[in-house]
Amino acid sequence: MIMKGNGITAPQWRLGLAGQADGDEFLGAQQQRLRPIADQELCGARDQSAGRVRMPVGGQSVPHHHDEDRTVVVLTGTAATLLMPVGADRWQSAAVTGPGDVIYVPAGWVHQAVNLGGTEVSAIEVSADPVFNRSVHALPDLAEQGLIVRLREAFADGRLLPGTHAA
């Protein structure tokens, strides 16, 4: 809400609605399609940012971590998010998420998203970073294609469902 006549000057901003198909989309270092919705540049955010993330059928991100915590809300599709806590040297679990599910990834945790199904995965990601996706640290050497193939097979066979964790 912008109040007039109170001496407060509102910052110039642009609203990026999550459902809009248009907008400035880019390919992030983790190989996902990204579009900022709210961040320092768009609306003067200081303590957080948010953006739309898209992953095509058969897609997967590059293993990576961020300097800040992340909260991801899945809008469409089914994904497995591989998780490796700080200090670990291998994947600890895979959280399987579908539409409406929320996943929290702590700062420094290595993670990799894998599209498991036959539709695009889209999500909203919120971070404590005021510039959306600024602190991504790609770690492509941690990718394990055999594990990804096994996760996709387990999902296709009905052995891996949204809301579950695979160890």
Image: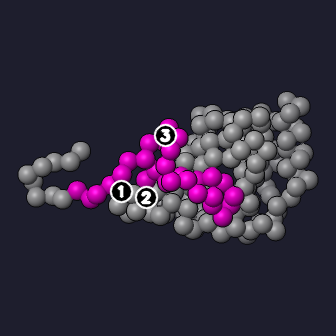
The residue at which mark 3 appears reads as: 20
Q: Which mark is residue 39?
A: 2
Residue farthest to the left, as pictured: 5
Q: What range is drawn magenta here? A: 10-39
Which element carries disc 1, helix, strand or loop? helix
Residue contact at pointers 2 and 1, CB within 8 angstroms: yes
Tell me the CA gap for discs 3 and 2.
Answer: 17 Å
Which element carries disc 3, helix, strand or loop? loop
Identify the amino acid type marked 1: Cys
Tell me the CA gap for discs 2 and 1.
Answer: 6 Å
Residue 18 rendering spot, x and y as whole percentages: 49, 42
Q: What residue is shown at x 35% (from left), y 61% (from top)?
A: 44
User: Quick check: 21 above or below 42?
Assistant: above
Identify the amino acid type marked 2: Asp
The quarter of the displayed image where residue 6 is located: bottom left
Residue 14 rendering spot, x and y as whole percentages: 36, 51
Identify the amino acid type marked 3: Gln
User: Quick check: 70 above or below 151?
Assistant: below
Mark nearest the camera among 3 and 2 is 3
The quarter of the displayed image where residue 64 is located: bottom right
The residue at which mark 1 appears reads as: 43
Pick the residue in front: 55 or 6.
55
